[in-house]
Image (tube, coloured by chain):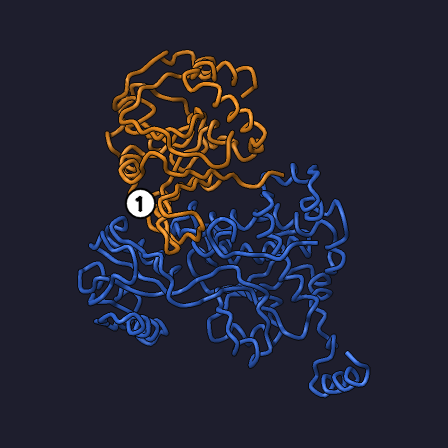
């Protein structure tokens, strides 16, 4: 960039308050000084963030808080969980009540631009899908022509399903019901042939059916609901820390590094693995952490696959297939930039 | 498994000829790390134990189900991810039929591309000597049938000793188990058998090695 242009750019940036490092945005230093990570979670969503029988927080989003705490503070238990409703979550982050929001929140343009927030990545690719009963031969949402579909009132799901049927020249009989519980009951009772909501929701609702084994959740995803952790937009350093903890968990899976193979990984001769565990290079230091940040996160919660399977996948009650959330090389679209 | 017992065991399938020797020695080079094959279920084979004959896993993640699956493999290909304990039948259009499997230690010793070379209903079972060493009470030969650990169907893979088979221990699905290659519940392997022809491509993939 020519100098004159650069000077102009900097002047404009200064006017807009977009300085390279806004003063007072020292989240990393604040977290280290405090010794705990304030992590915003949901008020209770099975598999993602919920209190278990012992009253401790557990779930997919909770494990991400633990991973960040392990990477930054060296201890996954140093997390103060702040349960937040859907309406207060972003304001809590903007006001500094929490350091990071890890609460099944969809990444959209408006949330970043209008609210001054940044999504640090996608931890879970959700999207709207269909669950059908008593129609064993249906294998695709395109075969739902003319069926009765139940949906909860006041959700974007109702609009999406209408769009989808119209786009594929299918006849839709939509039944709108006030609550999610009504929708499941209507499916179970035979009032509708199919129900629609986000995929993660379908797997949770399926457990409430009289005979869950007879319901089929179709693999089609008709909308984009990318869920991920959020930070304030004025703190690039902290944003990078959160972003690379997420990428580290995904890269760990790809490299074959898991909680149970962490010791083995420390002795590996592979350059990728050596950089990951901090035996080579100073990637962690460049982030403002230390060389072992990534392997500490993996030791605390496991790699992406372990976090997924334990909370929402094959080892959990929900049993959500990896689907889109499988590695790009294994049938999904999960892709993390390399750590080097 | 050590090399000598592996070779002894190969002699047992000498009918498969020298080709298998090459295939298997190449396979040893690609063996998965010990961590991936750590047994999660220490369970011996139980010849003679009759499971309910054609068990189909109906609930949970290991039930047969349609899933999203991006693949450049042609429709009909079988893809086995040993670390996940799943077998995928590629259906095209970004989807696959997924089956839960149990992976025995033989299942972790080989990865790559093979083809289904033979199909058999209620296959006989001849435990290899190294298994007899571990479990001396095993019979030397067992005719196919409901109590046979090979289960209701078998798909033989190339000229190797590996196969996709049923089991009389359906509770082992989803685990790393002591022996066998890729086992499905009997009802599920019958379903798979009906969808797969001889000559079908089978891709076996392990998690990355450290």
In percent of width and height, residue A1 lies at 77, 78
Report which colour depicts chain A: blue
* Residue A41 in picture, x, y percent from top left: 51, 64
Q: Colour of chain B?
A: orange
Name of the residue lying farthest toward the right: A3
Q: Establish if B127 lies above or below A251.
A: above
Chain for numbered disc 1: B
Image point (41%, 22%), residue name: B44
* Quadrant where the image shows the C terminus of chain B: top right
Among all residues in the image, which is located at the extreme left? A190
| Viewer-proximal residue among B107 and A209 | B107
Q: Which residue is label 1 attached to?
A: B59
Vertical placement of residue A293 versus A3, above or below:
above
Res. A184 in view: no
Q: Is residue B124 above or below residue A88?
A: above
Residue A98 in which image quadrant: bottom right
- Residue pictured at 50% horizontal, 75% vertical: A88
How many numbered badges does the structure rendering display? 1
Element at label 1: loop
State the residue at coordinates (24%, 30%): B52
- Hey, which quadrant is residue A220 in on the image? bottom left
Q: Position of residue B61 (x, y in %)?
A: 37, 46
């Amino acid at each position: 960039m020519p100098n004159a242009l650069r000077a102009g750019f900097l002047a404009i940036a200064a006017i807009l308050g977009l300085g390279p490092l806004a003063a007072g945005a020292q989240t990393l230093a604040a977290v280290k000084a405090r010794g705990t990570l304030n992590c915003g979670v949901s008020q209770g969503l099975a598999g993602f963030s919920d209190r278990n029988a012992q009253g401790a927080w557990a779930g997919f989003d909770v494990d991400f808080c633990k991973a960040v705490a392990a990477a930054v503070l060296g201890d996954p238990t140093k997390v103060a969980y702040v349960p937040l409703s859907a309406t207060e979550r972003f304001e809590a982050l903007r006001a500094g009540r929490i350091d990071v929001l890890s609460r099944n929140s969809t990444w959209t343009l408006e949330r970043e631009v209008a609210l001054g927030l940044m999504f640090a990545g996608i931890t879970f690719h959700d999207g709207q899908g269909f669950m059908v009963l008593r129609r064993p031969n249906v294998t695709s949402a395109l075969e739902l022509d003319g069926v009765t579909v139940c949906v909860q009132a006041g959700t974007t799901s109702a609009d999406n399903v209408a769009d989808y049927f119209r786009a594929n020249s299918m006849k839709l009989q939509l039944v709108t019901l006030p609550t999610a519980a009504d929708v499941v009951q209507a499916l179970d009772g035979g009032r509708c042939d199919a129900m629609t909501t986000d995929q993660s929701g379908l797997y949770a609702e399926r457990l409430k059916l009289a005979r869950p084994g007879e319901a089929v959740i179709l693999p089609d995803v008709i909308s984009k609901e990318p869920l991920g952790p959020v930070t304030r937009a004025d703190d690039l350093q902290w944003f990078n820390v959160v972003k690379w903890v997420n990428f580290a968990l995904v890269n760990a899976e790809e490299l074959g590094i898991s909680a149970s193979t962490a010791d083995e990984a420390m002795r590996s001769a592979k350059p990728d693995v050596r950089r990951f565990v901090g035996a080579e290079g100073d990637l962690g230091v460049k982030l403002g952490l230390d060389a072992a940040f990534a392997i500490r996160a993996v030791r605390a919660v496991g790699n992406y696959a372990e976090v997924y399977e334990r909370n929402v996948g094959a080892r959990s009650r929900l049993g959500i297939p990896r689907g889109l959330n499988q590695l790009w090389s294994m049938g999904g679209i999960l892709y993390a930039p390399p750590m080097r | 498994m050590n090399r000598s017992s592996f070779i002894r065991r190969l002699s047992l399938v000498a009918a498969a000829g020298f080709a298998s020797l090459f295939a298997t020695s190449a396979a040893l080079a690609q063996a998965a790390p010990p961590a991936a094959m750590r047994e999660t279920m220490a369970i011996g084979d139980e010849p003679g134990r009759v499971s309910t004959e054609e068990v189909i896993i109906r609930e949970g993640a290991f039930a047969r189900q349609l899933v999203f699956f991006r693949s450049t493999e042609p429709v009909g290909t079988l893809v086995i991810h040993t670390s996940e304990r799943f077998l995928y039948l590629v259906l095209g259009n970004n989807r696959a039929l997924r089956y839960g499997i149990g992976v025995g230690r033989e299942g972790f010793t080989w990865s790559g591309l093979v083809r289904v070379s033979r199909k058999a209903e209620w296959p006989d079972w001849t435990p290899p000597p190294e298994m007899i060493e571990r479990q001396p009470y095993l019979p030397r030969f067992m005719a196919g049938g409901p109590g046979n650990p090979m289960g209701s169907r078998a798909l033989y893979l190339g000229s190797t000793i590996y196969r996709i088979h049923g089991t009389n221990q359906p509770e082992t699905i989803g685990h790393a188990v002591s022996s066998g290659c890729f086992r499905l519940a009997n009802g599920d392997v019958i379903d798979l058998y009906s969808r797969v022809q001889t000559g079908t491509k089978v891709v076996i993939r392990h998690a990355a090695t450290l």
